[in-house]
Image: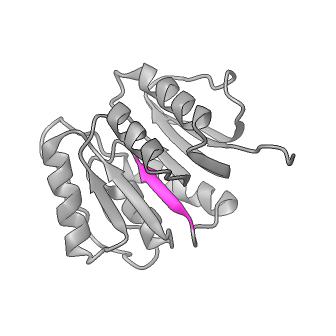
């Protein structure tokens, strides 16, 4: 897996051996970032790659201009791979965390951190994670207005219960890509 565009273009991202992580395929990743380029300006924005695996999505975001990115993975091996990738690229504006997602979100709330883009790609068998995380993110104002939530899943999901705008939906053979945006009205 390589960085597609930007400052770190061409860097071969190191990945974790085995089945503990499931990297997004090159085609889905390229499609996702091509779509995002139409809806999202990376400069001066903060990202969160919540089930980061190798860190490829957050690294791609930083390569395209994110000011800051938080990388989280509860799996110790993934934590070490992300740290290695960031060190190899000499990335200093990425923070690597090793928390269960509930602990991570509580840490974010306690530290008054807000984000502009969320890469949400949990283990496929944990479908409830999508809904739990989006609920917490919205309820606690973790995502800024016009912030983007990117979801990849192995089954169709419904987001009608959330006050989010579906910017794009794309179906692949065995995967689904959703790009959602928070658009609060001006008060």
Query: Is 83 left or right of 150, judged from the image as shown?
Result: left
Q: Residue at x 33, y 35 (%)?
A: 103
Picture quarter containing residue 43? bottom right
Q: Is residue 48 magenta?
A: yes
Q: Can residue 127 be seen in the rendering of this structure?
A: yes
Q: Is residue 29 magenta?
A: no
- Which range of residues does the magenta coloring cover? 45-49
Q: Can residue 121 be seen in the rendering of this structure?
A: no
Q: Is residue 76 above or below residue 12?
A: above
Q: Is residue 53 above or below residue 47?
A: above
Q: Position of residue 163 (x, y in %)?
A: 72, 31
Outermost residue on the right side: it is 187
Q: Position of residue 53 (x, y in %)?
A: 27, 47
Q: Is residue 16 above or below residue 139?
A: below
Q: Residue at x 17, y 64 (%)?
A: 84
Q: How many marks?
A: 0
| Quadrant of the frame with the N terminus | bottom left
Query: Is 156 left or right of 56, judged from the image as shown?
Result: right
Residue in front for this viewpoint, 111 or 171 = 111
Q: Is residue 72 above or below residue 40?
A: above
Residue in front for this viewpoint, 52 or 133 = 133
Q: Residue at x 56, y 28 (%)?
A: 135
Q: What's the image's color scheme?
A: one colour
Q: Position of residue 65 (x, y in %)?
A: 51, 73
Q: Residue at x 37, y 46 (%)?
A: 24
Q: Position of residue 45 (x, y in %)?
A: 56, 65
From the image, give the main secondary structure of the stretch colored magenta.
strand
């Amino acid at each position: 897996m390589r960085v597609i565009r930007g400052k770190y273009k061409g860097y071969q991202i190191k990945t974790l051996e085995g089945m503990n992580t499931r990297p997004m395929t090159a085609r889905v990743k390229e499609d996702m970032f091509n779509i995002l380029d139409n809806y999202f300006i990376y400069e001066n924005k903060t990202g969160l790659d919540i089930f980061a695996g190798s860190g490829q999505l957050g690294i791609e975001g930083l390569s395209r201009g994110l000011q800051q990115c938080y990388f989280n993975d509860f799996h110790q091996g993934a934590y070490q791979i992300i740290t290695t990738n960031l060190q190899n690229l000499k990335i200093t504006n990425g923070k690597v965390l090793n928390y269960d997602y509930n602990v991570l979100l509580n840490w974010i709330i306690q530290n008054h951190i807000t984000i502009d883009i969320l890469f949400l790609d949990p283990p496929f068998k944990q479908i409830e994670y999508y809904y739990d995380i989006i609920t917490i993110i919205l309820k606690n104002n973790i995502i800024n207005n016009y912030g983007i939530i990117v979801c990849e899943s192995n089954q169709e999901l419904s987001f009608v219960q959330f006050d989010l705008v579906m910017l794009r939906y794309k179906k692949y053979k065995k995967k689904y890509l959703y790009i959602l945006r928070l658009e609060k009205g001006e008060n």
